Image: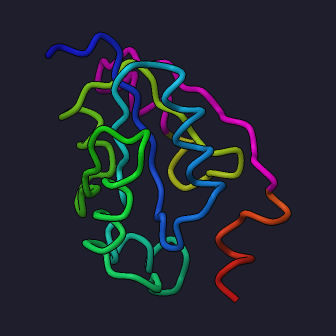
Amino acid sequence: MKFSKKVMVFGTFDILHKGHLNFFKQAKKHGDYLIAVVARDKTVKKIKKKKPKHYEMFRLLNVALTKDVNIAVLGSLNDPYKVIEDNKPKVICLGYDQDSYTAKLEDELKKRRLKIKIVRLKPYKEHIYKSSKMRK
């Protein structure tokens, strides 16, 4: 089965909650095949300055089992943009508060000659469903 419009999202997805599920649902509306890229443990530690609560394989499996995600993959340790090149999505959906490596995203896509639409998604009850608040 060939999918006409692949959509990609990125995240740690450490404590999978309703905000993440809404994020996947919103992203899926932009295409017919959703690829969720789960951050590697080393990447999370580097970006968030702390280890994730759950190991990457546990987080990957949880994301893969959600309704709207067609496939979950681990991000690259060496080149965060390689997973984009490998999967060639038509759309990348970013969370409302996602800022890790997104500032350079458009420039990096142009440099790699990738024509991908970038969409910023809406928050979902961010005062309740925000991983940093739920982790405490």
Count of all numbered marks drawn on residues in the image: 0
**Residue at the (52%, 66%) spot, across then down:** 16
Asked if the stretch drawn in magenta spans residue 107, the answer is yes
Q: Residue at coordinates 60% horizontally, 63% vertically from top-left?
A: 17
Quadrant for residue 58, please give it: bottom left
Point out the image quarter for the C terminus.
bottom right
When the figure is inspected, residue 12 is found, relative to residue 120, above or below; the finding is below
Q: Quadrant of residue 131?
A: bottom right
View extreme (top): residue: 4
Please state if 40 lies on the left or on the right of 68 as rendered. Answer: left
Instruction: Name which residue lies at 22% across and 32% down.
Output: 87
Residue that protrudes farthest toward the left in the picture: 1
Q: Position of residue 69 (x, y in %)?
A: 38, 42
Q: Where is residue 9 shown, x and y percent of the image? A: 45, 41
Q: Quadrant of residue 120?
A: top right
Depth order, front residue of 136/21:
21
* Magenta span: 105-125
Q: Is residue 20 left or right of residue 71?
A: right
**Which residue corresponds to the image point at 53% horizontal and 83% vertical from the top-left?**
49
Q: Residue furthest front?
A: 67
Q: Is residue 30 above or below residue 15?
A: above
* Looking at the image, residue 70 lies above or below residue 74: above
- Who is closer to the viewer here, 2 or 55? 2
The reply, left or right, for residue 21 in relation to residue 91 is right
* Colouring scheme applied when the structure was drawn: rainbow
Q: Is residue 75 left or right of residue 19?
A: left
Q: Is residue 50 above or below residue 130?
A: below
Q: Quadrant of the N terminus?
A: top left
Give the image location of residue 6, x and y in percent.
Answer: 34, 23
Q: Is residue 73 magenta?
A: no
